[in-house]
């Protein structure tokens, strides 16, 4: 993400890192639309005010995304409770990964569904580790947990996914 | 970790996160391109600071075109146009009456007061990059500070609907690049929307 400082164009930068940020935001929001709102808020704040700050821009942005998502969740908690009562709970089916060709896409949908069923604290560590490529130390700092806890959650998440996906591949 | 976990890990890494929507990109473009345009046309650092002020933390932008929040933007644009027209008339009247202006606060260099500027409507039409001794609109913002669901109401045809009230403070700012004088106008606004209600 050093490109943010080297490349003055936000477009090319967002082209590269926007999908990862969106996936990250999706872990902490109720819908894709909310995730996009959160990414917009965090990215604009970063690009306007934090781009030249020292430190790791990736960690800064993810922290910003997470904070924006938590703020949004607090603001909307009452509305969400009403909606859940009305429609029986949130069951979003918006894809979080690019479709894969042929039969692979069926597998992609299964993985997305399995991810959806993971415990949120395990899923967020998994997403940060796999798709943001953060170390356990960075994840621990970001989520305010120890690196060991982050590593444990990651292993639990993988084990839970393996169990969910076992009938197809891991038997 | 055993082999199956490594295999799963690799399978997950092969998945590519989906790209943000075109709408999000357009929204970012609108916000960030405005910054660039403003900083190019307004060389004063004070004005630049005003333009780049971040949004309040409680504000979110509508994510879909069907969202009620778009109505707020449309109304804000309409209000801004109405304001510019009325300000032009007001300045014209002030000049023709040859009396000092009242009602709005002007900060900055008092040696060159606002009435010396040409009407704002003329300024908007004359889009020049040169620094002119006149007030130019530099910022329009609205802050949503209360959003309340006022419950069910019945329309004239007995259709059930939900009434939602949003309360804003709209703020418009003008700057005179030559003197760094600024003029800011804030006005409260209530927006009531009646949304069709459906029962399952």
Image (cartoon, grey):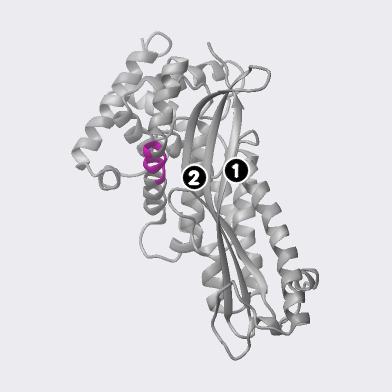
Q: Which residue is located at x 38 percent, y 28 percent?
A: B9
> In this rendering, does residue A20 appear at all?
no
The image shows residue A1 at horizontal and vertical percentages of 46, 54
Is circle 2 on the same chain as circle 1?
A: no
Q: Secondary structure at mark 2?
A: helix
Please tell me which residue lies in front, B61 or A109.
Answer: B61
Instruction: Give whichever of B21, B65 is nearer the camera.
Output: B65
Q: Residue at x 29, y 21 (%)?
A: A159
Q: Are marks 2 and 1 in contact (CB under 8 Å)?
A: yes
> Label 2: chain?
A
Q: Which mark is residue A39?
A: 2
- Residue at the spot 61% in from the left edge and 85% down from the top edge: B179
Residue B104 picture quarter: bottom right
Element at label 1: helix
Is B180 placed above or below B122 here? below
Residue A109 in the image: above or below residue A77:
above
Query: Which quarter of the rendered picture does the N terminus of chain B lie within?
Result: top left
In the image: residue B167, left or right of residue A148:
right
Residue B68 visible? The answer is yes
Quarter of the rendering containing residue B91: bottom right
Q: Is residue B153 left or right of residue A153?
A: right
Magenta span includes A73: yes
Q: Residue B95: where, in percent of width, then height?
A: 75, 81
- Read off the magenta span: A68-74
Give the numbered dot on residue B24. Answer: 1
Q: In the rendering, at what x and y percent does residue B30 appear?
A: 64, 53
Compared to residue B124, the image places residue A136 above or below, namely: above
């Amino acid at each position: 993400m050093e490109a943010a400082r080297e490349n003055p164009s936000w477009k090319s930068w967002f082209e590269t890192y926007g999908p990862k940020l969106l996936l990250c935001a999706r872990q902490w929001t109720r819908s894709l639309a909310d995730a996009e709102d959160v990414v917009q808020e965090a990215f604009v704040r970063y690009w306007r005010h934090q781009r030249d700050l020292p430190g790791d821009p990736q960690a800064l942005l993810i922290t910003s995304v997470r904070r924006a998502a938590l703020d949004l969740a607090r603001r909307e908690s009452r509305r969400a409770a009403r909606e859940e009562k009305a429609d029986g709970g949130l069951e979003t089916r918006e894809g979080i990964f690019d479709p894969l060709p042929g039969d692979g896409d069926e597998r992609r949908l299964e993985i997305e569904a399995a991810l959806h069923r993971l415990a949120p604290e395990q899923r967020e560590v998994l997403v940060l580790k796999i798709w943001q490529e953060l170390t356990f130390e960075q994840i621990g700092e970001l989520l305010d947990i120890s690196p060991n806890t982050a590593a444990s959650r990651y292993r639990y998440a993988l084990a839970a996914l393996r169990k969910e996906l076992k009938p197809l591949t891991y038997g | 970790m055993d082999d199956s976990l490594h295999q799963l890990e690799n399978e997950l890494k092969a998945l590519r996160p989906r790209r943000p929507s075109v709408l999000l990109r357009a929204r970012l473009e609108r916000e960030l391109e405005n910054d660039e345009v403003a900083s190019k046309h307004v060389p004063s650092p004070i004005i630049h600071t005003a333009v780049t002020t971040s949004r309040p933390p409680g504000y979110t932008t509508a994510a879909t075109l069907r969202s009620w929040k778009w109505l707020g933007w449309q109304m804000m644009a309409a209000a801004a146009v109405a304001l510019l027209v009325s300000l032009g008339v007001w300045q014209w009247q002030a000049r023709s009456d040859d009396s000092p202006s009242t009602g709005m606060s002007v900060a900055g260099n008092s040696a060159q007061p606002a009435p010396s500027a040409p009407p704002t409507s003329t300024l908007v039409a004359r889009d020049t990059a040169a620094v002119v001794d006149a007030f130019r609109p530099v910022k329009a913002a609205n802050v949503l500070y209360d959003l309340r669901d006022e419950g069910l109401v019945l329309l004239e045809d007995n259709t059930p609907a939900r009434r939602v009230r949003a309360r804003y403070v709209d703020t418009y700012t003008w700057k005179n690049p030559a003197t760094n004088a600024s003029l800011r106008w804030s006005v409260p606004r209530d927006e009531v929307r009646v949304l069709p209600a459906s029962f399952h």
